[in-house]
Image (cartoon, rainbow, N blue to C red):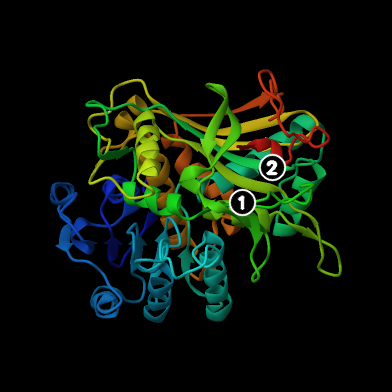
Amino acid sequence: MTKHAALPGRLLMLGFGSIGQGVLPLILRHIDITPDRITIISPDDAGKAVADEYGVTFLKMALTRENYVGELEARLGQGDFLCNVSVEVSSLALIRKCRELGALYVDTCIEPWPGGYTDPDLSPSQRSNYALRETALALKRELGAGSTAVIAHGANPGLVSHFLKVALLDIAKASGVDATRPDSREGWAALAQALDVKVVHIAERDTQKGEPAKARGEFVNTWSVNGFVGEGCQPSELGWGTHEPEMPPEGRRHDFGCDSAIYLMRPGAGTRVRTWVPSEGPIHGWLVTHNESISIADYFTVRDEAGAVVYRPTSHYAYHPCDEAVLSLHEFAGKNWELQPSVRILMNEIQPGGVDELGVLINGPAKGSYWYGSQLTIDEARELAPHNNATSLQVTVSVLAAMIWAIENPTAGLVEPEEVDERRIMEISTPYLGTMAGYWTNWTPLQDRETLFPEDLDRSEPWAFKNIIVH
């Protein structure tokens, strides 16, 4: 197997759930590092057998506000690497400490300390991903150039931002527009505007199925239950486009930051939207908050000379998880967002044949909507990498790619996925993503509407969010 990069220092991994267990064999396969230079810190024993399998040091310990400084100082220094796949450990605190120590850093989301997602004393705006991102951007400005920290680089957020750039070039080529790859943020935003991109959906459908089936009082998922529940309890968030004719009744703007997004006064676990995926066509997905919803809208913004926004796409997640997770969400909502007493992540018990279909659905171009992404079966995932299912592998290979990019670009400072070269990420990731393909469709959220009952629709703007949200 190709060794894409060498890490001469130490690697510290925080958290060792499904993503940590899945990325470890990929790191050892594609980064030149020996197991004796890797340490895992995890708050429980989950995955200890996997760490033992690879000869990696495993420490059962929870990182807290009180102990994280000492623990990082004991295990990280100049040229070392912190791979953070934990929950309830502040990403910003870790990034700041890594900068002091000269260590590289990567994570899959901007994580707060415990309570940051669900503290009732915080307003919905304050516990949003928008707010977390704004604090990260403030830290970026404060720290400036220095050791690289790649934030929010899993499957989504992360990999999908690279899918979007590939897809925009595909659309340009098919539409007779100059398909020369832009070399700046302004160039990418101008391309999206030229193609009349109005809405970007992160459109995902997971058909993996496990045995035994979900039991009463159990939350079942194909990736972190705590991660899914945490973001599901946050308000729904979406990047807010310039084509939108009206704010939704439950919509609110933030009174700080870049103003690229809005939030809804309802949780993501209770908000559904219309979208489209190649395997099924039209589906309903959950509008769960994700960092890429905000960062994509911000990155692809066009401003005039005075700084006023003249173009911005709407962007958001539209996620249909596996059927057991759908039942788990239904039960979770019925208990007023109180998590079930038992949780289970599907891995070895997943039956053959399921697919995680993850891509970007780009809506608005004259030629139609275009979905581009990964169609990865559980059978392929098992052949490609141990300790992964189809969902986790799309995340873990993206973490691997971000680590390699950081090693190759060690002084880039704090960067978001949109600032990373999509060509390098795709080169590393594509062999692990199953079928990578693009599909055109004439679907719009107005298709087959009002067949049984009248609806309040905006037919003058098919891509208005009013037509996409499910009431």
Disc 1 is placed on an element classified as strand
Q: Residue at the far top: name it.
A: 451
Q: Earlier in the sequence, mark 1 or mark 2?
A: 1
Q: Nearer the viewer, residue 53 or 359?
A: 359
Residue in the picture at 40% in, 81% down: 100
State which quarter of the image contains the C terminus.
top right
Count of numbered tags:
2
In the drawing, does residue 253 fall left or right of residue 67?
A: right
State which quarter of the image contains the N terminus.
top left
* Residue type, numbered disc 1: Leu
**Residue assigned mark 1:** 238
Q: Nearer the viewer, residue 145 or 230?
A: 230
**Do residues under tags 1 and 2 come within 8 Å of each other at their CB atoms?**
yes
Residue in the picture at 44% in, 49% down: 232
268 w.r.t. 381: above or below = below
Q: Position of residue 350 (x, y in %)?
A: 28, 28
In the drawing, does residue 86 fall left or right of residue 446?
A: left
**Residue assigned mark 2:** 465
